[in-house]
Image: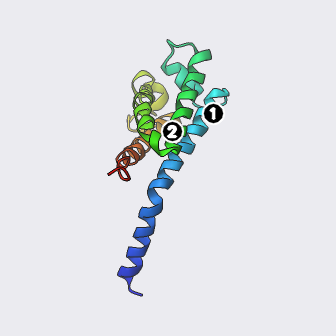
Amino acid sequence: MSFNKVDKEITNFLKKIGLPLLRYSLAVIFIWFGILKIFDASPAISIVTNTVYWFDKSWFVPFLGCWELIIGLCLLYKPLIRIAVLLLIPLILGTFLPLIILPKVVYGNIPVLTLTIEGQYIIKNLVLIAAALVIGSHVRDEED
């Protein structure tokens, strides 16, 4: 069997499983993180409450958890993917607020490019955004 044939079979297999795996993985992340916030068990609660200090923690953190849970559940059901991507927009924008509001929490010592663990937690959202864009870009695949 030639390298080209093996390579083609592997890439075809990856095409077949890649998008569903990405969608389910993103769903798990949002469901899990959402549930943690609903039950006041998320390690991100302090950064959330310190960032949006104008909201009362007692209702905002569970609300945010429900929002994330809904995104995750929408990702599990193909007809609701558009809703998931739409709900992601304000959530993701909000996750970057600490970079501006809490610079002492997210950046390490000089140089500013050094990130604390909280900063890394926020920057990893770039991957979540990219995943959501890829998933969203395929919603019409079976419709056309």
For image coordinates 54% across by 33% down, the residue present is: 70
Question: What residue is pinned by disc 1?
Answer: 35
For image coordinates 46% across by 26% down, the residue present is: 104
104 lies above or below 1: above
For image coordinates 46% across by 39% down, the residue present is: 80
Give the mark nearest the N terminus, 2 or 1: 1
Amino acid type at image mark 2: Cys
132 lies above or below 61: below
For image coordinates 41% across by 63% down, the residue present is: 15
SS assignment at label 1: helix
SS assignment at label 2: helix
Eye-nearest disc, 2 or 1: 2
Q: Residue 21: where, in percent of width, then height?
A: 50, 55
Q: Residue 26: where, in percent of width, then height?
A: 50, 45
Q: Quadrant of residue 30?
A: top right
18 lies above or below 118: below
Q: Residue 19: where, in percent of width, then height?
A: 44, 55
Q: Quadrant of residue 31?
A: top right
Quadrant location, the N terminus: bottom left
Q: Which mark is residue 74?
A: 2
4 sits left or right of 14 in the view: left
| Pointer 2 with pointer 1, Cβ within 8 A | no
Q: Is residue 124 visible?
A: no
Q: Residue furthest front?
A: 144
Along the viewing direction, whichever of 23 and 106 lies nearer the viewer: 23
